[in-house]
C-alpha cells in the first residue's frame, strides 16, 4: 500500500469531502431551493397575472346605462334602450374609440347569474345595460372629460374604466408579492446562516491543518478558495435536488389553480424567461454558497495571527 | 560566522522582545537578537526554557507581546496578514512534532510549500522526487504520512522545510527521531544549505550535535537569551558557558 503509485493523484490539503457538515448543508440547501423555487414561481405568476390583467384592461373601458325608473316596464325598457343607442352613437363618433360592443341580453344574464342563481326571471329585473368600448392603439383618453360628455349625451350613462376593482386586485397581488419576497429573503438568510455556521464548525475541525498551511505561507485566500470550491459544489448539488423536487410541485399547484372558476388564476402562466430563472436556481444556490463560504473563511481567519 | 558585506543585513532582529500567553507571566523577556544572513546557530536551553516559543516568534506563528521585531527587514509589529504569509514562504520549519498532513502522501506533504507558492505540477514533481530520493524516501513517496514511522516522518518534515530553498531554516530537534546513520546526513543537508546562503537555527538538546558541528549557540536561561561562541565541551544547563 505504501508503494502504491496509483495514489499519485493530488488530494486537497483540507479533507473537506469527509466533513459531516457536507450532508447537512446539502439537505439544507435542497430544502431552501425547493421553497425558493415554489415561492419564486408564485411571485413570477403573480407578475404575469398582473401583466395579463393590465394588458386586457388597458385600452378598454365599460359604459353602464342605468335602467330607467319608469314604473311602466315596457316604457322603462324602451327608455333604457334609447339611452344606450344615444350613447353608442356618441361613442362611435369619438376619435379615440375603435370598437363599441353593447352586451346583449344573454351576455348580461350570464354575468349576473352567478350572483342571483337560476330561479330568477331576469327579464323582469331592471338590469343595467353594458357597453364594452375598445380604444384605438396608442389613443390617449381623458376619462374625466369623457364622463362629462357622456353625462351630457345621456344622464343614465356612467363610465367605468376598471381602475377601481383593478386597483384593489393590484393592491392584493402586491401584498402577496411582498409576503413572497419576505419568504425569499428569509430563506436566503437562513441558508446563508447555515453555511456560515457549518463553515465555522469545519474551520474549527480543521484548525490544525489550517495552522500548518499558514505556517507554510498560505494566504487566507488559498484556504478560502478550497472552502468556496467545496461549498459551491454542495450548493449546486443541493440546488439540483431542490429543483427536481420543486418542478412537479409547481405543475401540481398550477393545475390546481387553473381549476378555480373565473379564470383569474389561470391568467398566471409562467413565461419561458420565468422558467429560465427557476431552472437557474441551482447555479444561484451554488454561487451564494460559494461566496458565503469564501467570506466566512476570510472573516474567521482574520482573527488569527 | 565571519561577517562579509553580503551578510550585513540581519534576517531576524529583536529589540527588548517579550512574550507571554494571555495574562500569564512572560516566558521570554527583553530578548535582544540579531541573526545575520548566512549564519548558523544552535538554540539551547533546558526543557521549558522557551526554545519553542522563541522559534515560534521566528517563524511568525505569533507576534511579540512587547518589543520590536524585524524579519527580512520588515517590522513584524505592523505587518498585515498577507505580508506575513509572504515572509513565511521564505522560512522553512522543522517542527518537533513534525506537523505533517496525515491524510496526505509523503509526496504531497513535501510538495505543499511549492504548491502554496503556485509552482507548476511538472516542476513540483521534479523537485519533490529528487529530494525524497535524497532523504531515502523515494520508495514511500505515495504512502500516506499516517502510515510512516517516526523517523520517516521526520525526514519528510525536513524535506518539506527545505524544498523551497528557504532563506531562513528553523528546526526543533530535527534529528531526534532518526537513526544514527541518517542524522549526520541530515545535518550535512543543513550545512550545505547554509553554505548556499540559508540562515539556520537548530534547537537541540544534543551535546554531540553541538560538539560535532562547531557553530555558535543561542542559549535560553531565566527567560533571557545569551549568545555563545562555538565551544567543544559545555553543559546544556548553561553552567559553564563563557
Image (cartoon, coloured by chain):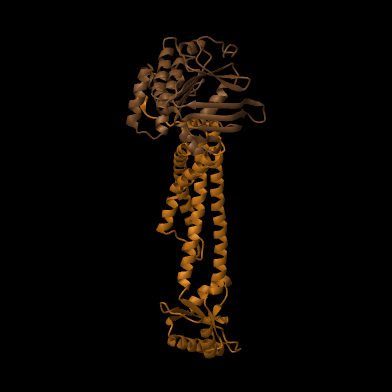
Chain colours: A orange, B brown
Quarter occupied by the C terminus of chain A: top right
Q: To which quarter of the image does residue A138 belong?
A: bottom left
Where does residue B29 sit, x and y in percent of width and height?
Answer: 62, 26
Instruction: Examine the rendered structure and indicate whether residue A303 appears above or below residue B36.
Output: below
Where does residue B95 sit, x and y in percent of width and height?
Answer: 50, 22
* Residue A256 in view, yes or no: no
* Residue A283 in view, yes or no: yes
Which residue is painted at 54% across and 90% down in the image? A152
Where does residue A191 sit, x and y in percent of width and height?
Answer: 54, 45
Q: Which of A89/B220 is in front?
A: B220
Where does residue A281 sit, x and y in percent of width and height?
Answer: 45, 49
Q: Which of B129/B143 is in front?
A: B129
Which residue is painted at 59% across and 14% down in the image? B238
Instruction: Examine the rendered structure and indicate whether residue A231 appears above or below residue A143.
Output: above
Q: To which quarter of the image does residue A169 belong?
A: bottom right
For the image, the number of numbered tags is 0
Q: Which of A170/A230 is in front?
A: A230
Quarter occupied by the N terminus of chain A: top left
Which residue is painted at 52% across and 9% down in the image? B233
Q: Which of A143/A128 is in front?
A: A143
Amino acid at each position: 500500500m505504501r508503494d502504491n503509485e496509483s495514489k499519485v493523484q493530488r488530494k486537497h490539503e483540507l479533507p473537506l469531502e469527509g466533513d459531516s457538515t457536507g450532508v447537512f448543508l446539502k439537505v439544507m440547501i435542497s430544502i431552501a431551493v425547493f421553497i425558493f423555487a415554489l415561492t419564486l414561481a408564485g411571485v413570477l405568476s403573480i407578475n404575469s397575472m398582473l401583466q395579463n390583467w393590465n394588458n386586457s384592461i388597458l385600452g378598454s373601458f365599460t359604459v353602464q346605462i342605468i335602467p330607467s325608473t319608469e314604473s311602466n316596464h315596457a316604457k322603462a325598457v324602451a327608455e333604457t334602450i334609447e339611452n344606450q343607442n344615444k350613447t353608442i352613437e356618441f361613442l362611435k363618433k369619438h376619435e379615440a374609440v375603435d370598437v363599441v360592443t353593447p352586451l346583449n341580453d344573454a351576455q348580461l344574464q350570464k354575468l349576473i347569474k352567478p350572483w342571483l342563481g337560476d330561479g330568477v326571471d331576469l327579464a323582469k329585473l331592471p338590469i343595467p345595460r353594458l357597453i364594452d368600448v375598445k380604444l384605438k392603439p396608442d389613443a390617449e383618453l381623458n376619462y374625466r372629460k369623457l364622463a362629462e360628455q357622456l353625462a351630457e349625451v345621456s344622464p343614465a350613462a356612467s363610465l367605468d374604466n376598471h381602475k377601481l376593482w383593478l386597483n384593489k386586485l393590484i393592491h392584493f397581488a402586491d401584498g402577496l408579492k411582498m409576503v413572497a419576497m419576505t419568504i425569499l429573503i428569509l430563506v436566503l438568510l437562513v441558508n446563508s446562516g447555515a453555511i456560515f455556521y457549518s463553515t465555522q464548525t469545519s474551520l474549527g475541525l480543521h484548525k490544525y491543518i489550517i495552522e500548518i498551511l499558514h505556517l507554510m505561507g498560505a494566504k487566507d485566500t488559498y484556504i478560502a478558495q478550497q472552502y468556496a470550491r467545496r461549498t459551491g459544489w454542495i450548493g449546486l448539488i443541493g440546488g439540483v435536488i431542490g429543483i427536481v423536487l420543486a418542478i412537479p410541485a409547481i405543475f401540481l399547484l398550477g393545475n390546481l389553480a387553473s381549476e378555480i372558476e373565473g379564470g383569474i388564476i389561470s391568467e398566471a402562466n409562467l413565461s419561458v424567461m420565468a422558467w429560465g430563472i427557476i431552472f437557474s436556481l441551482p447555479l444561484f444556490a451554488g454561487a451564494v454558497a460559494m461566496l458565503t463560504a469564501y467570506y466566512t473563511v476570510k472573516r474567521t481567519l482574520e482573527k488569527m495571527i | 560566522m565571519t561577517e562579509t558585506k553580503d551578510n550585513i543585513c540581519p534576517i531576524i532582529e529583536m529589540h527588548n522582545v517579550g512574550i507571554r500567553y494571555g495574562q500569564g507571566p512572560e516566558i521570554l523577556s527583553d530578548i535582544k537578537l540579531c541573526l545575520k544572513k548566512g549564519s548558523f546557530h544552535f538554540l539551547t536551553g533546558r526543557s521549558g526554557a522557551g526554545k519553542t516559543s522563541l522559534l515560534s516568534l521566528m517563524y511568525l506563528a505569533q507576534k511579540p507581546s512587547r518589543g520590536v521585531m524585524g524579519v527580512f527587514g520588515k517590522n513584524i509589529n505592523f505587518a498585515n496578514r498577507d505580508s506575513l504569509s509572504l515572509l513565511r514562504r521564505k522560512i522553512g520549519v522543522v517542527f518537533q512534532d513534525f506537523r505533517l498532513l496525515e491524510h496526505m502522501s509523503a509526496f504531497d506533504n513535501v510538495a505543499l510549500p511549492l504548491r502554496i507558492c503556485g509552482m507548476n505540477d511538472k516542476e513540483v514533481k521534479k523537485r519533490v522526487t529528487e529530494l525524497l530520493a535524497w532523504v531515502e524516501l523515494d520508495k514511500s513517496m505515495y504512502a500516506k504520512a499516517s502510515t510512516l514511522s517516526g523517523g520517516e516522518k521526520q525526514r519528510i518534515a525536513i524535506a518539506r522545510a527545505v524544498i523551497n530553498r528557504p532563506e531562513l531554516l528553523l528546526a526543533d530537534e530535527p534529528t531526534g527521531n532518526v537513526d544514527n546513520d541518517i542524522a549526520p546526513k541530515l545535518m550535512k543537508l543543513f550545512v550545505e544549505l547554509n553554505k548556499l546562503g540559508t540562515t539556520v537555527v537548530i534547537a537541540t538538546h544534543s551535546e554531540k550535535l553541538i560538539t560535532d558541528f562547531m557553530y555558535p549557540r543561542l542559549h535560553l536561561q531565566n527567560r533571557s537569551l545569551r549568545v555563545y561562541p562555538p565551544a567543544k565541551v559545555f553543559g546544556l544547563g548553561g553552567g559553564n558557558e563563557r
